[in-house]
Image (cartoon, coloured by chain):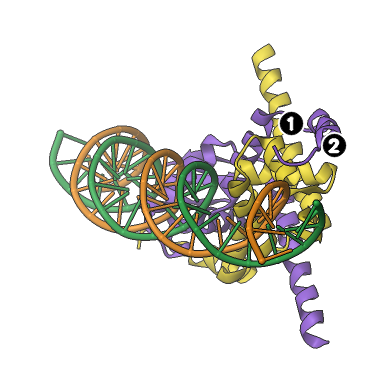
Chain colours: A purple, B yellow, C orange, D green
DNA sequence: CACTCATATGAATGAGTGTACATATGAATG
DNA sequence: CATTCATATGTACACTCATTCATATGAGTG
């Protein structure tokens, strides 16, 4: 169909990671694509915390937080340990910090640029 | 409710970015949380391309690609220019490269660790 | 200016998912 | 061992969103 891009596509196809890897990458970013989960991760960046502390911090149901922690845990982004009746959650991966940081930097710098435009 | 974390929460609340910023951050990552969009971005990382080339590369409808490009464009992650009848899309932001790269690194290193575990 | 090619867009559909509610598990306490 | 506190989990519902289909726009071409 359409016009010819075989030469270009051949090259790009060659250098492109597999579909499976790219899908897994999307699934990874999907974890960061929810405001509740991002807030949880940022909170844990400051300090490890028990479930009810996170719930109180975010002003959300314990159930909602617990479900999200389960999601984050099955992706190995957070870990937990029991201490008596409470369960303490913490960041399990130093990459979380880097990934969040890069996204954050992007946002900040984008806003700077927008301000420059507005000021012109 | 529950047990007391006021001292901890006070500290964490103080250092935490605003809800608005964290929500925007989640929205940013949401863009990377779809395999079609990730594939498009990776493709554009290799070379700028017209819409139908991307569609052919991903073996998807032109319409689907066009819709996703619109999404990426309104987030300023890609830009485009007309050349006659075709429209060429390209990455508009160097951060895209970094963010994708960090996610990629995480995946790769996670797989290395899993292999070590399996080999033990 | 009819026709074709490349892209964009609007509406509809279907799949995925975040949250609330109810309830279960599990640990301490007396 | 009954009770309470902290957390986990199953289900249902509402909502978001990616894709498809049909159609519109827009640029070349003869």
The quarter of the rendered structure image containing the C terminus of chain A is bottom right
- Can I make out residue B3 in this image? no
Query: Marks 2 and 1: which is nearer the front?
Result: 2
**Residue drawn 84% across and 41% down?**
B46
Q: Is residue B29 left or right of residue B83?
A: left
Tag 1 residue: B108
Q: Which residue is painted at 85% across and 44% down in the image?
A: B47
Which one is in front, A47 or B78?
B78
Residue D7 locus on image (x, y percent): 40, 44
Residue A8 is tagged as: 2
Q: Secondary structure at mark 2?
A: helix
Residue B73 image point, x, y percent: 69, 61
Around disc 2, counting alpha carbons within 10 Å, would you say few (fewer than 14), some (14 to 19), or many (20 or more)? Answer: some
**Residue A71 seen by the camera:** yes
Residue B98's tag is none
Tag 1's secondary structure? helix
Looking at the figure, which quarter contains the N terminus of chain A?
A: top right
């Amino acid at each position: 169909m359409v016009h010819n891009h075989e030469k270009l596509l051949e090259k790009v196809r060659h250098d492109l990671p597999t579909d499976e890897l790219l899908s897994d990458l999307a699934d990874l970013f999907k974890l960061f694509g929810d405001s509740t989960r991002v807030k949880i991760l940022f909170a844990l960046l400051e300090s490890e915390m028990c479930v009810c502390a996170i719930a109180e911090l975010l002003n959300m149901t314990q159930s909602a937080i617990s479900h999200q922690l389960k999601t984050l845990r099955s992706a190995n982004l957070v870990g937990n340990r029991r201490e008596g009746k409470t369960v303490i959650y913490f960041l399990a991966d130093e990459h979380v910090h880097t990934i969040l940081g890069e996204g954050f930097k992007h946002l900040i710098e984008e806003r700077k640029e927008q301000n420059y435009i507005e000021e012109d």
